[in-house]
Image: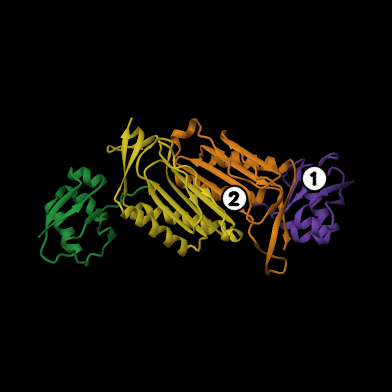
Chain colours: A purple, B orange, C yellow, D green
């Protein structure tokens, strides 16, 4: 299946887009999405070590399941303040 | 753009607002008699920032992008966590969204506690965590 | 007793005043564009204090006695020293003299700096030195 | 000669006065005044380890000379804030 991942800030600039899509196995986990992002979007690799995935506006553990209707967002450690 | 002044009277106030921030009115609460210290932090947009090449460069404003509603939720969760962890009497955290000019305030944090030490430690802990957890990004608008 | 609100617009403001303190108006100065952090500390009279026997006891007010004009001079010297040592852009320190009720502010310190870290360090240094150098004493008025 | 020393806070309470007088040698120093306070006012000894003498509203070194018209104040480490 294919999932959309929202991106922001420096990641959005690197992707030249506000979201990116990646192909993941069926019944994917957060770890699967992050691995697919690294494999399919080399331009985003710089940010992945400090990034976490949020599912429906909450940070999710790497083992968490991703469902078909979930909103996914990649949040990198470049905060406000 | 008018700066926004909040009225703070509950134990936890947190919000992301689409404007620069002014001084919130800090209403004395029932906790007032235990209060020994109120510490307020204003984060202000500085004129000089480091650009991608590592050079200092002048800007006119910062444009804050937020991932909503997660930004609000994380701010609230963080405020509630810091209130409890540091035994504060009250906390308010307000962050700007959108464009904030140089010299204007984009972030206000106020903590009220029985003693100075816990207020200052809580303030440091909040700001450190904010930079890690809050889905808020700033884009420089160069001069 | 009306609380006193100061207008702060020079690099160093310091004063001992015979009343409780309100929020000073913080006027943006020429330094404004370099400012990244403004931190304000309010010392508030707490209801519970430890009495001579080491027991917690309720009070209604603190009565601050000052040795004048040394109190003012030491406050000013300390503010100027901290401004320079910590490369602050601005500092204001105002202390009450006389009776201040529980819940009211008896000491206000505001520091303005390019970055949060130096503002917080300067604030701690100021308050620690104040307790050593300022000829100001407090007498509890027990409930 | 005899000098007057202003006292405050807990020291004033212990002395039951706002100033105390002590006999000092002629051409006294700050150290002489502090020594005389300890010798003549045992009730104030508790405060002397943390106390400093101010001459005319400025903290003075222990070797500083005390003149006849100087205002002396004993400032103990029990400050405001």
What residue is at 81 percent from the left and 60 percent from the top? Answer: A14
What residue is at 56 percent from the left and 34 percent from the top? Answer: B9
Residue occupied by mark 2: B127
Taking D45 as reference, is C39 left or right? Answer: right
Where the C terminus of chain B falls, by quadrant?
A: bottom right
Residue occupied by mark 1: A72
Query: How many numbered marks are there?
Result: 2
Element under disc 2: helix
User: Which of these two is toward me, C59 or A17?
Assistant: C59
What residue is at 65 percent from the left and 61 percent from the top? Answer: B47
Q: Are marks 2 and 1 in contact (CB under 8 Å)?
A: no
On what subunit does the disc labeled 2 rest? B
Q: Residue B70, located in which quarter of the rendered image?
A: top right
Taking C22 as reference, is C129 left or right? Answer: left
User: Which of these two is toward me, C9 or C107?
Assistant: C9
Residue C82 appears in view: yes
For disc 1, the neighbor class at 10 Å (few under 14, some 14 to 19, many from 20) is many
What residue is at 44 percent from the left and 60 percent from the top? Answer: C82
Q: How far apart are marks 2 and 1 (CA)?
A: 25 Å
For disc 2, the neighbor class at 10 Å (few under 14, some 14 to 19, many from 20) is some
Q: Position of residue B1 (x, y in %)?
A: 70, 47
User: Which of these two is toward me, A31 or B14?
Assistant: B14
Q: Position of residue C4 (x, y in %)?
A: 44, 42
Residue C114 appears in view: no
Element under disc 1: strand
């Amino acid at each position: 299946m294919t999932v959309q991942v929202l991106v922001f800030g420096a990641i959005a600039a690197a992707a030249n887009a506000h979201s990116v899509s990646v192909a993941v196995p069926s019944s994917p986990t957060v770890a699967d999405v992050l691995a697919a992002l690294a494999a399919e979007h080399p331009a985003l690799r710089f940010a992945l070590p400090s990034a976490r995935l949020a599912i429906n506006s909450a940070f999710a553990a790497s083992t968490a399941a991703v469902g078909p209707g979930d909103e996914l967002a990649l949040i990198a450690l470049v905060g406000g303040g | 753009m008018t700066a926004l002044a909040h009225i703070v009277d509950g134990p936890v106030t947190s919000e992301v607002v689409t404007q620069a921030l002014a001084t919130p009115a800090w209403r004395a609460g029932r906790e007032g008699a235990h209060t020994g210290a109120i510490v307020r932090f204003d984060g202000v947009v500085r004129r000089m920032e480091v650009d991608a090449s590592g050079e200092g460069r002048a800007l006119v404003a910062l444009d804050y992008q937020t991932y909503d509603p997660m930004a609000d939720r994380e701010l609230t969760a963080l405020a509630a966590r810091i209130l409890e962890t540091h035994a504060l009497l009250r906390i308010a955290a307000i962050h700007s969204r959108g464009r904030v000019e140089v010299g204007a305030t984009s972030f206000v944090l106020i903590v009220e506690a029985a003693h100075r030490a816990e207020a200052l430690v809580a303030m440091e802990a909040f700001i450190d965590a904010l930079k890690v957890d809050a889905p808020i990004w700033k884009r420089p608008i160069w001069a």
